[in-house]
Amino acid sequence: MKNRKIDWRARWLLTVILLSLMPTTVLASAYKFEIVLFERPGGGSGELWPAEPGEPDPEKAVGRLSAAGGSGGATMLPASSKILGPAAYTLKKKGMIVHDHLAWTQATRGRNSDTWYWIGSGRLSGLVRLSRGRYLHLDTDLLLRDAGSSQPYRIKLHRRMRSDELHYVDHPKLGILIRAKRLETQAPSNGPDGTSAGEPKPVAPPPTSQPG
């Protein structure tokens, strides 16, 4: 009988903990991302590049990021939600080739997660990953083909980021502007019983004894 009492108390305590932590865990990892990928025409012309650098593996992608729509847990956002339009315009005026300007939301996972997304088409395409440890992290595995010679350039980059800051990732052939914003939800109003709307109701403790 004593062991049964302990078992019921342990289950009740575990239920309360899970109900209280679950919403916070989900909301804490949701971010809005906006990215601008641009090419530097003629950049890196004085450097040596491998003739066959290999290609990113599309099979690693859990989804796709494109203006036509997102998949794999990514939700694309309309043009009205973008704030890097002036920066993209300035890059074009300076002779850069803007290949992609996208905004989307996704839940970020741990630093070693496999949540790679396929991005781009045509001359620039490949994989990007946004993950979260102590900081946010951007990783890329992209392939850029030269417009004139079709020479491939494999571009693997990493950048540690903070949210609500604009970050610039530099490469001789390619540049990336990226910004992350943590999504916050408005606290729901309290119900008539004093609990928030949508908040789990208090769980009654189990009886101190069990019949039979």
Image: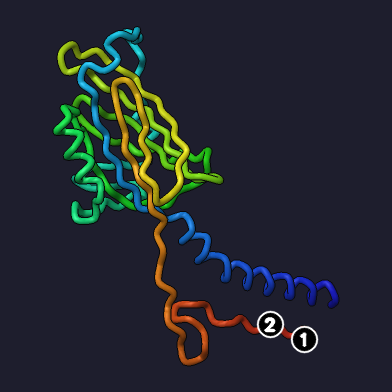
How far separated are the C-alphas under marks 1 and 2? 16 Å
Q: Residues within 10 Å of mark 2 (few under 14, many from 20)?
A: few
- Tell me which corner region of the image, top left, top right, bottom left or bottom right, holds residue 204: bottom right
Task: Count the numbered circles shown.
Answer: 2
Look at the numbered disc 1 and give the secondary structure of its residue. Answer: loop
Q: Which residue is mark 1?
A: 211
**Quadrant including the N terminus:** bottom right
Rendering coords of residue 95 (x, y %)? 16, 27
Look at the numbered disc 2 and give the secondary structure of its residue. Answer: loop
Rendering coords of residue 201 (x, y %)? 54, 82
**53 or 209: which is nearer to us?**
53
Q: Amino acid at mark 2?
A: Pro
Q: Amino acid at mark 1?
A: Pro
Q: Which residue is mark 2?
A: 205
**177 or 114: which is nearer to us?**
177
**199 or 167: which is nearer to us?**
167
Residue at image location 42% in from the left, 34% down from the top:
139
User: Is 137 drawn above or below residue 94 in the view shown?
Assistant: below
Residue at image location 27% in from the left, 48% down from the top:
103
Left of 46 or right of it: where is 121?
left
Q: Residues within 10 Å of mark 1 (few under 14, many from 20)?
A: few
- Tell me which corner region of the image, top left, top right, bottom left or bottom right, holds residue 46: top left
Rendering coords of residue 61 (x, y %)? 37, 36
Rendering coords of residue 7 (x, y %)? 76, 71
**171 or 121: which is nearer to us?**
171
**Mark 1 and 2 residues: CB-CB less than 8 Å, in contact?**
no
User: Is 30 drawn above or below residue 13 in the view shown?
Assistant: above
Tag 2 or tag 1, which sits nearer the N-term? 2
- Tell me which corner region of the image, top left, top right, bottom left or bottom right, holds residue 141: top left
Residue at image location 52% in from the left, 88% down from the top:
194
